[in-house]
């Protein structure tokens, strides 16, 4: 049991707080002061959607096979550090292979917002299928990587259908190219809408925020279908409503929606519903929803201060971004994936072991 003697710090939610503070501070320092902003805006932001899609497939649908639990070979006698390194290596290699294929084989796009626009579609479908639908009807019936391959085929097929039949590139530098399919939905509008949809996926998911309430009585996949319909409807209301109220598009999806997503994840999993675990079912769900709204609001204020130096340099360099775009990138492409990978792949090494997502269950008070 050598591994257990290496644990640093407290158990449970306190370990999650330490994990969050360390990740946020290190991530902000590196992001604001050490990575060239032109590289972030023009290369890293669009390219990051590929590694987010791969992370979703590995952790949600592939059950962290072959090294980490629940599908991998890790046991308490094995090193969490090497387990995390092994999973991270798979994540990096798969992301690199897919990026190279898209750059040089098919569809041969230059690194550009095309990857961001298509990637958001694929990422939203990955989360919807992996979290709300839990890989239905295949997951648990086939090998984890067979599940991952199946889900990738489903997600990429649906994303390609949406891209070809429903999107247009009007108003972008690609408007007059063959890549513009002249569909009914502008890709920039669709991007904001799908980020809002992801926020509602996390709100209604079986493991985050409301832990599936109020749809749990519908069973599976009935609850998943209801969550999908309601999430898409509420996303439309939030996206179009915020624009009608005069909010800037980047603030609506970049600051507000991405902060909701971030805190739905962090509060429900990494902080383990801190402070409200004595409540169950609807009471816990409503309290979690309210608290996530409060934390997301506070977080937007923190990001406005922490990212202001980077935003000022972006503005002076006339790069196509603002502080809200930097916020969504930091939230969803740095903070959230690092926290997810640290829990799912590295089992929160060297801190105490994390609880599985959805803990405690909605019918259990602690």
Image (spheres, helix red, strand yellow):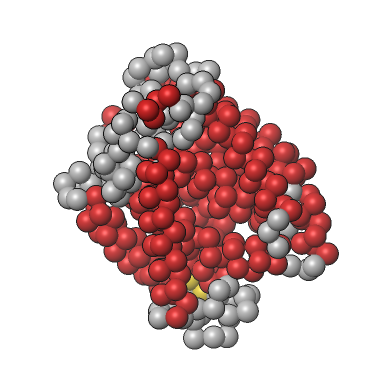
Find residue 250 and report its horizontal and vertical position in percent. Answer: 66, 55
Residue sitting at 27 percent across and 60 percent down? 149
Q: Nearer the viewer, residue 7 or 216?
A: 7
Quarter of the image with the C terminus is top left
Measured along the vertical axis of the image, is residue 55 above or below residue 266?
below
Measured along the vertical axis of the image, is residue 352 above or below residue 90?
above
Find residue 289 and report its horizontal and vertical position in percent. Answer: 52, 30
Measured along the vertical axis of the image, is residue 292 above or below residue 365?
below
Residue 364 in sight from this viewpoint: yes
Q: Nearer the viewer, residue 32 or 281?
A: 32
Q: Nearer the viewer, residue 196 or 75?
A: 75
Residue sitting at 36 percent across and 69 percent down? 161
Residue closest to the far left: 141
Measured along the vertical axis of the image, is residue 30 above or below residue 358?
below
**15 with respect to 140 (left or right):** right
Quarter of the image with the N terminus is top left
Find residue 362 and report its horizontal and vertical position in percent. Answer: 37, 23
Residue closest to the far front: 2
Find residue 67 and report its horizontal and vertical position in percent. Answer: 31, 45
Query: Number of numbered discs present?
Result: 0
Residue sitting at 30 percent across and 38 percent down? 74
Residue 252 in sight from this viewpoint: no
């Amino acid at each position: 049991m050598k591994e257990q003697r290496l644990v640093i710090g407290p158990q449970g939610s306190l370990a999650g707080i330490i994990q969050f503070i360390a990740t946020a501070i290190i991530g902000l320092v590196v992001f604001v002061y050490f990575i060239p902003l032109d590289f972030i805006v023009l290369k890293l932001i669009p390219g990051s959607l590929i590694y987010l899609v791969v992370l979703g497939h590995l952790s949600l649908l592939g059950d962290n096979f072959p090294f980490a639990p629940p599908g991998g070979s890790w046991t308490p006698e094995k090193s969490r550090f090497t387990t995390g390194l092994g999973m991270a290596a798979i994540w990096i290699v798969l992301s690199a292979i897919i990026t190279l294929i898209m750059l040089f084989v098919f569809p041969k796009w230059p690194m550009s917002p095309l990857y961001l626009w298509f990637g958001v579609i694929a990422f939203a479908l990955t989360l919807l299928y992996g979290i709300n639908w839990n890989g239905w009807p295949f997951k648990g019936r086939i090998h984890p990587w067979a599940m991952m391959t199946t889900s990738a085929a489903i997600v990429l097929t649906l994303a390609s259908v949406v891209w070809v039949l429903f999107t247009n590139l009007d108003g972008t530098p690609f408007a007059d190219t063959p890549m513009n399919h002249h569909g009914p939905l502008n890709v920039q509008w669709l991007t904001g809408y799908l980020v809002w949809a992801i926020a509602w996926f996390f709100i209604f998911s079986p493991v985050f925020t409301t832990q599936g309430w109020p749809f749990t009585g519908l069973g599976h996949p009935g609850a998943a279908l209801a969550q999908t319909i309601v999430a898409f409807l509420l996303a439309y209301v939030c996206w179009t409503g915020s624009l009608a109220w005069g909010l800037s598009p980047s603030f609506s999806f970049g600051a507000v929606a991405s902060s909701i997503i971030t805190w739905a994840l962090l509060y429900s999993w990494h902080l383990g519903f801190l402070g409200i675990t004595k409540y169950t079912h609807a009471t816990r769900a409503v309290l979690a929803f309210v608290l996530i709204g409060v934390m997301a609001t506070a977080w937007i204020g923190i990001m406005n201060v922490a990212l202001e130096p980077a935003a000022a340099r972006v503005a002076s360099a006339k790069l196509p971004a603002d502080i809200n775009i930097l916020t969504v990138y930091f939230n969803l492409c740095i903070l959230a994936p690092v926290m997810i990978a640290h829990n799912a792949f590295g089992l929160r090494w060297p801190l105490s072991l994390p609880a599985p997502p959805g803990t405690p269950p909605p019918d259990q008070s602690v």
